[in-house]
Amino acid sequence: MNNVSRPLRVGVVGCGSFGRHAYSDNVVDHPDANLTAVCDVDLERAETVARDLFDVHPQRPRAATYTDYQEMFDKESLDVVMVGTMADVRPTVTIAALNSGAHVLAAKPMAPSLADAEAMLQAAEGADRMLMVGYNFRFRKDAQAAHKFIRSGGLGTPRFARTWIHAGSIPVWGPHYIKSRSGGGSLASTGVHTLDLGVWFLGCPPLLSVEGRASARFGDLPTLPPDLEAVGDTYDVEDLVSGYVTFADDVTLSVESMWLAPPKVGDNGVDVWGTEGYASLSPFQLLTWRDGDYVDVTEEVAPGIADTFEDNPRVRTRTEVLHFIDCALGKTSPLITPKEMWTDQAIVDGIYAGGRSYS
């Protein structure tokens, strides 16, 4: 989709931990892209990113710095914008970037509401620009191997998936515990990662209905570690979520997302049952039904992954960023489609609403 021979001009909005380490740090690793500009409401934070990256990569131009994203879009003629802000301003920034002519990679969760997400998708379609939300668990090697196995018919027709994240603490490095900023707690900020994998593995069939409950036990805990005591006065999100999703053709999905899980159950995973097999990420297993029993084909289909794969957030976010730049260069297509982005957000909205029909 890029018709120029020069390196892509990339801008990043939001220079906090995620915008810095997931986006800015990785853009400079792509040979056909330059980090042209960075924007943050805190100018010193933007200046720190620009300075640090120029010190490490002096052969690249130093990024210009802004506190006003619209000014950045107006002045810099950006080809790609990466939006690493919190969810409350993500739709507004994303739509402005799309309208400026840039392709947009936006962090998850997509938006505070389905209406906001739909506005983002409509803006992308109207501007004829790519929009991809960073559900970066898709860039894990185990997830990609499982998806390939499922899509190739290894477990027959997918019928049911169970997705879960049981996180040991609360992400206090950003205001993910404040609903007006984050759009939600353990589901929107954390559990959406595996929820998205479940939708992807099932093939994103038409969504019919969602049931669910979201509650918090944070305020009931008699004592807290110091880092959590510090957020107690502003914490207003859920940390216990369960949901059940019905798609067309009797395909179903269950969702669990918890914060403050005991160490022995702190984990995440996806299980998929099909008409002729089973796939799992925790542990990584690929099973096919043959001659009246399950046959383990894990090593045959994906040699070495079960023994060697360890999830590394920096690896998957780096892979995601380089992939999106390649999409903007016309070398490949976005791994995450508009229909899948809509479905993920619709499920989140449905669970938070306590139930919703989409048929």
Image: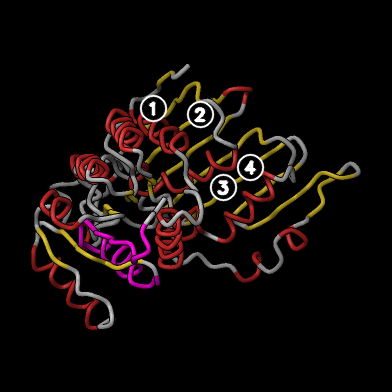
Residue in the foreground of this view, choosing between 160 and 92: 92
In this picture, which residue range is highlighted in magenta?
4-31
Residue at 43 percent across and 37 percent down: it is: 338
Q: Are marks 1 and 2 in contact (CB under 8 Å)?
A: yes
Q: Which residue is disc 1 drawn over?
A: 350
Which comes before the other along the chain, label 4 or label 1?
4
Q: Quadrant of residue 262?
A: bottom left
Q: Disc 3 versus disc 1: distance between alpha carbons? A: 20 Å
Residue at 20 percent across and 40 percent down: it is: 92
Q: Disc 3 versus disc 4: distance between alpha carbons? A: 7 Å
Helix, strand or loop at mark 2: strand
Amino acid type, callout 1? Gly
Amino acid type, callout 2? Val
Q: Disc 3 versus disc 2: distance between alpha carbons? A: 15 Å
* Farthest residue, direction right: 291
Q: Are marks 3 and 4 in contact (CB under 8 Å)?
A: yes
Q: Which residue is disc 2 drawn over?
A: 245
Q: Are marks 2 and 4 in contact (CB under 8 Å)?
A: no
Q: Which residue is disc 4 drawn over?
A: 272
Helix, strand or loop at mark 4: strand
